[in-house]
Image (tube, rainbow, N blue to C red):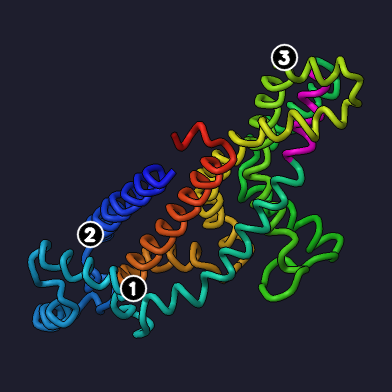
């Protein structure tokens, strides 16, 4: 088990180094920040002074070395626009993004697990067909379209819930449904396929032969073994949740990291983009590490 944990930690470090290098290099695709932050008619001397002040006139290797040394300490420099620490700016918006992502994940599990289990238990029946249609239809709906429809119906027409904002549970409902619906179809189909595979195993037939009720067979025998692949995929889906949060936060004016990062990319605010990408990537890596360790604990054969 110790070798298993050590191997996962080494992989985590290697992945983070690679992500930091990619994030640093890709920001140069955005162009020169002086072209965005300075007036179009700014003289060349002003642009040169700006680049020198921001350290953009140094060789790329030196810039990355400075960036990497600061990233290890959690220091990505100050925002070019807001003039505050990029790390603190991301930290201010991180709770809102995590709150939305966890709420969306919870909503997806509440919908997907029961539907997937029911569909598998009633394989080939009209109930199975209906659950599958719901999953396929949900997967085909764009998240931005669903968000807009939710706003039109529940905010504009029925006036039950606010269309945007942050701070109360009412503000959470529509973004949670939109984001959770993005993950629920994939999870539901995965639960269904795993449950179908488990329900064909010999120990399930034995449990049924002993006279156990269908609900007891599902809860005590089938679900535990079908849950391991689902847990593994949910760790990977956490990154997709953060990706879906970009659209969700934009549609519902949610003050999270994702929408703030998109704005920073448009403004050429390198430090904020670096901080957001590295911090979110670190979160995804840590979640996947935790999932790997949990699966290794639940199934010791994996960690051997």
Q: Which residue in the structure is indicated by mark 2?
A: 28
Pointer 1 residue: 74
Helix, strand or loop for disc 3: helix
Cβ–Cβ under 8 Å for marks 2 and 3: no
Residue 276 placement, left or right of 179: left
Percent position (x, y) of residue 234?
58, 43
Quarter assignment of residue 256: bottom right
Q: Residue at x 50, y 43 (%)?
A: 236
Q: Residue at x 74, y 54 (%)?
A: 150
Marks 1 and 2, how far apart at CA: 21 Å
Disc 3 target residue? 202
Magenta stretch encompasses residue 120: yes
**Which mark's residue is nearer the viewer, 2 or 3?**
3
Q: Badge 1: how crowded within 10 Å, few (<14), some, or many (20+)? A: some
Q: Position of residue 295 (x, y in %)?
A: 55, 41
N-terminal label among 1 and 2? 2
Residue 36 in picture, x, y percent from top left: 28, 71
Mark 1 or mark 3, which has the lower sequence index? 1
User: Relative to residue 190, is residue 210 depicted above or below?
Assistant: above
Is residue 210 shown left or right of residue 52? right
The reply to whether discs 1 and 3 touch (Cβ–Cβ < 8 Å) is no
Mark found first going from the N terminus, 2 or 3? 2
Q: Main secondary structure of the magenta part?
A: helix
Q: Which element is circle 2 on?
A: helix
Which of the pair 101/200 is nearer the observer?
Answer: 200
Q: Residue at x 59, y 69 (%)?
A: 96
Stretch in magenta: 112-123
Quadrant of the drawing holding the C terminus: top left
């Amino acid at each position: 088990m110790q070798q298993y944990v050590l191997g996962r930690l080494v992989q985590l470090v290697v992945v983070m180094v690679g992500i930091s290098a990619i994030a640093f290099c890709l920001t140069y695709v955005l162009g020169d920040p002086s072209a965005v932050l300075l007036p179009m008619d700014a003289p060349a001397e002003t642009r040169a002074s700006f680049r020198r002040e921001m350290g953009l006139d140094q060789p790329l290797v030196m810039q990355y070395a400075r960036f990497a040394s600061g990233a290890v300490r959690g220091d990505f420099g100050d925002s070019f626009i807001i003039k505050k620490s990029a790390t603190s700016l991301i930290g201010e918006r991180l709770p809102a993004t995590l709150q939305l992502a966890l709420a969306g994940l919870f909503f997806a599990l509440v919908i997907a697990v029961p539907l997937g289990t029911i569909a598998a238990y009633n394989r080939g029946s009209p109930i199975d067909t209906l659950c599958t249609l719901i999953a396929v239809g949900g997967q085909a709906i764009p998240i931005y379209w669903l968000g807009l429809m939710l706003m039109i119906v529940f905010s504009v027409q029925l006036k039950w819930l606010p269309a945007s904002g942050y701070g109360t549970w009412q503000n959470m409902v529509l973004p949670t449904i939109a984001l959770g619906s993005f993950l629920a179809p994939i999870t539901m189909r995965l639960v269904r396929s795993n449950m179908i595979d488990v329900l064909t195993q010999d120990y399930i037939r034995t449990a049924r032969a002993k006279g156990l009720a269908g609900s007891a067979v599902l809860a005590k025998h089938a679900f535990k073994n079908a849950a391991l692949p689902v847990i593994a995929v949910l760790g990977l889906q956490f990154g997709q949740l953060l990706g879906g949060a970009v659209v969700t936060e934009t549609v519902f004016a949610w003050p999270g990291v994702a929408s703030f990062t998109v704005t920073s990319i448009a403004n050429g605010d390198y430090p904020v983009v670096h901080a957001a990408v590295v911090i979110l990537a670190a979160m995804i890596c840590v979640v996947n590490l935790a999932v790997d360790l949990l699966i290794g604990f639940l199934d010791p054969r994996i960690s051997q």
